[in-house]
Image (cartoon, rainbow, N blue to C red):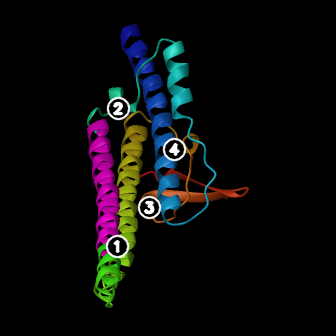
Amino acid sequence: MALDLKEKEVYSHIAHESAEDMIRIISSIDAERAKIRGEIIHYEDDWDELMKQRVAKGKRHTAFDFYNPSLLTIWENKVKNMKKVKNLFKLGLILLGLFIAGGVAVTVIYREFWVLIPLSVVPMVIFLFDYKKNALDIGYYQLTQLFIEELKELLKKYELDPEKYKFKIFNHDYFGVLTKKIGTSVFAMVKKD
């Protein structure tokens, strides 16, 4: 019986730390999403400092190690996809720039307005910026919503109080959260079922 209580206490403590990890992750990802949308955000991510403190205490577990190791894989895959989007954007801009530069060069060499043909692709630049913004926005949204759902399940499973796990939020379009303005910041917490 005493061993059961001790085990439950240990898992509850680890669940608490995992929930803290998740609220930091949610706020960090949401801050990045808000920046992509053009908002000026002053948010400091303290993830590295948290890990240093845990290592100093001899603890190395995170939400990924304890609660759901597949979260790390999902997160890494999403980040890879978002890096692909950024790289495609850069490649597209380079190709468009080369095409326009080629048109300018041909215009200079032949002294005719060949530059008009490459200039016709300038609207593609608008498309590339829009594609990048929307693809990254949806990627960050999905990742944030995933962590909100995982936090909800963690709090429910280990009977932790959602009120203690508020997180700073910058966008207001997530499901399953209650938002509350405290001072100049907006905080959210997961809804209980």
Disc 4 and disc 2: Cα gap in Å?
Answer: 20 Å
Q: Are marks 2 and 1 in contact (CB under 8 Å)?
A: no
Q: Nearer the viewer, mark 3 or mark 2?
A: 2
Q: Residue at x 46, y 16 (%)?
A: 59
Q: Which residue is mark 3?
A: 174
Disc 3 and disc 4: Cα gap in Å?
Answer: 16 Å
Disc 3 and disc 1: Cα gap in Å?
Answer: 44 Å
Identify the magenta region. Answer: 71-100
Q: Position of residue 175 (x, y in %)?
A: 41, 61
Q: Are marks 3 and 4 in contact (CB under 8 Å)?
A: no
First-in-chain label (3 vs 1)? 1
Looking at the image, which is closer to me, 133 or 128?
Answer: 128
Label 2 crowd bin: few (<14), some (14–19), many (20+), radius 10 Å? some
Q: Which residue is mark 2?
A: 64
Q: Are marks 3 and 2 in contact (CB under 8 Å)?
A: no
First-in-chain label (4 vs 2)? 2
Q: Position of residue 50 (x, y in %)?
A: 54, 27
Instruction: Give the amino acid at mark 3.
Output: Tyr
